[in-house]
């Protein structure tokens, strides 16, 4: 469900080569699209993802199952 404050929303995308860190293109894109961004890396297992802030800094994100 999208948050009411759309400035909090961000993006989620995959890096098929497995790098779970923002690329230069990501760092240019992130600030224009929200505060938090998920990158999911190959091979897409349970722990193959990270959350980053709009400036590319790692951000702790609690997953509730």
Image (tube, grey):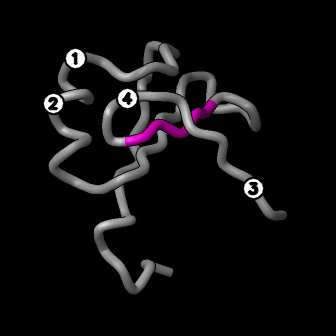
**Residue 60 horizontal/vertical position (percent):** 66, 41
Q: Earlier in the sequence, mark 1 or mark 4?
A: 1
Q: Earlier in the sequence, mark 3 or mark 2?
A: 2
Nearer-the-camera pick, 33 or 14? 33
Residue corresponding to mark 4: 56
Residue corresponding to mark 3: 63
Residue at 35% across / 51% down in the picture? 11
Instruction: Report the side of 40 relative to 6 (left or right).
Output: right
Q: Are marks 1 and 2 in contact (CB under 8 Å)?
A: yes
Residue at 45% across / 13% down in the picture? 17
Nearer-the-camera pick, 36 or 13? 36
**Residue 2 horizontal/vertical position (percent):** 43, 78
The span picked out in magenta is 49-53
* Figure check: 40 above or below 9: above
**Residue 56 horizontal/vertical position (percent):** 37, 29
The alpha-carbon separation of the residues under discs 1 and 2 comes to 6 Å
Residue 50 highlighted magenta (yes or no): yes
Residue corresponding to mark 1: 24
Secondary structure under badge 4? loop
Residue corresponding to mark 2: 28
Secondary structure under badge 3? loop
**Which quadrant of the figure has residue 57?**
top left
**Which quadrant of the figure has residue 31?**
top left
Residue at 30% across / 18% down in the picture? 23
The alpha-carbon separation of the residues under discs 1 and 4 comes to 10 Å
Instruction: Report the side of 9 relative to 62 (left or right).
Output: left
Q: Residues within 10 Å of mark 2 (few under 14, many from 20)?
A: some
**Residue 58 horizontal/vertical position (percent):** 53, 30
Q: Earlier in the sequence, mark 4 or mark 2?
A: 2
């Amino acid at each position: 469900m999208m948050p009411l404050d759309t400035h909090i929303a961000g993006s989620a995308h995959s890096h098929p080569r497995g790098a779970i860190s923002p690329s230069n293109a990501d760092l240019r894109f992130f600030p224009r699209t929200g505060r938090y961004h998920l990158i999911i890396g190959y091979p897409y297992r349970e722990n193959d993802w990270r959350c980053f802030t709009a400036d590319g800094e790692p951000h702790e994100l609690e997953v509730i199952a």
